[in-house]
Image (cartoon, grey):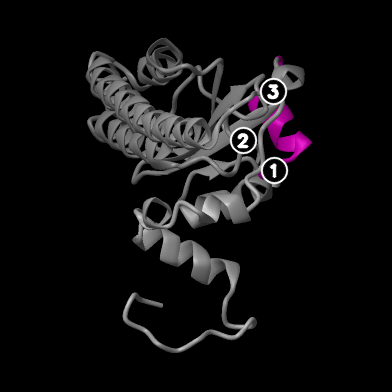
Amino acid sequence: MNDNTKSVLTDSELTEEVVASYLTSHKDFLDKHPDIFKAINIPHMESTGLSLLERQIELWKKEAKASQNFLEDIINNVRANQVLVEGIIRFSAELQKATSFEQLVSLIQFQIKSYFPIHHVSILFISFDGFHQSLELLPESMHQLFTPLLLSGKPRLGNYNAHQVTLLFPQDARAINSMAMIPINSLKAKAVIALGSPDQDSFSEDKGIEFLEYLQLTISSAFDRYLGSNIE
């Protein structure tokens, strides 16, 4: 539809969308045809007493507020990611202070809770090179509980069962309402790092796994570094 057209649209062609599109592209239409106000029904918002102009202004304000909220969400996400990156850098630096593999394992659990908002951390070893007196291996009969995770090589959010929670958090199983599992398939060790939370949304399946992948890479490298150097 345009000002130069001579054709007449039928009722089926003159849809609300066509009218709305025309009015949107001809913003001065009502100024040029003021008598239309006498012929159309303009709903009056009795509860608020808003005029047509005031109603338009309110819609603009809502759109501006939505845009502001969207921008604030982006800024908050950037800040949150920056905090996580800084935490990963500090976490990696702290792990290098370990003088033995046993101390490294203790540091991993302590520092994850120190640098990130994570309540529970557990490390379950499937295998490792050498003998480490204070560390225990998962009985071979239970390996199948974590084999799919280790074979996938990818961190997992949610999708766990009660038996896994009990093995990973024997003393805190009842407090775990959401959990993430990180498979460690380093050259010198295989393990599962579990992060638990009482909040059921902390590690829900719709969250991203980038942070978990950073932890996975950092811990795998640390395992190989300490087990490969035979520091006891």
Assess whether residue 186 is covered by the magenta stretch: no
**Amino acid type of disc 1?**
Met
Few, some or many C-alpha atoms within 10 Å of disc 3 (few <14, some 14-19, many ≥20)?
some
- Judging depth in this view, the residue of 218 and 14 nearest the camera is 14
- Judging depth in this view, the residue of 77 and 72 nearest the camera is 72
Which residue is denoted by mark 2 in the rendering? 138
Disc on the earlier residue, 1 or 3: 1
Q: In terms of secondary structure, where does tag 2 sit?
A: loop
* Residue 14 x, y percent position in the rendering: 57, 77
Few, some or many C-alpha atoms within 10 Å of disc 1 (few <14, some 14-19, many ≥20)?
few
Relative horizontal placement of residue 48, taking residue 190 as reference (left or right): right
Which range of residues does the magenta coloring cover? 159-171
Which residue occupies 51% across, 67% down? 19
Q: In terms of secondary structure, where does tag 1 sit?
A: helix
Q: Are marks 2 and 1 in contact (CB under 8 Å)?
A: yes
Which residue occupies 53% across, 34% down? 55
Which residue is denoted by mark 3 in the rendering? 176
Nearer to us of marks 2 and 3 is 3
Which residue is denoted by mark 1 in the rendering? 142
Assess whether residue 163 is covered by the magenta stretch: yes
**Amino acid type of disc 2?**
Leu
Quarter containing the N terminus: bottom left
Disc 2 to disc 1, C-alpha distance: 7 Å
Disc on the earlier residue, 2 or 3: 2
Disc 1 to disc 3, C-alpha distance: 21 Å
18 above or below 27?
below
From where the camera sits, is residue 42 visible?
yes
Q: In terms of secondary structure, where does tag 3 sit?
A: loop
- Marks counted in the figure total 3
* Residue 58 x, y percent position in the rendering: 49, 30
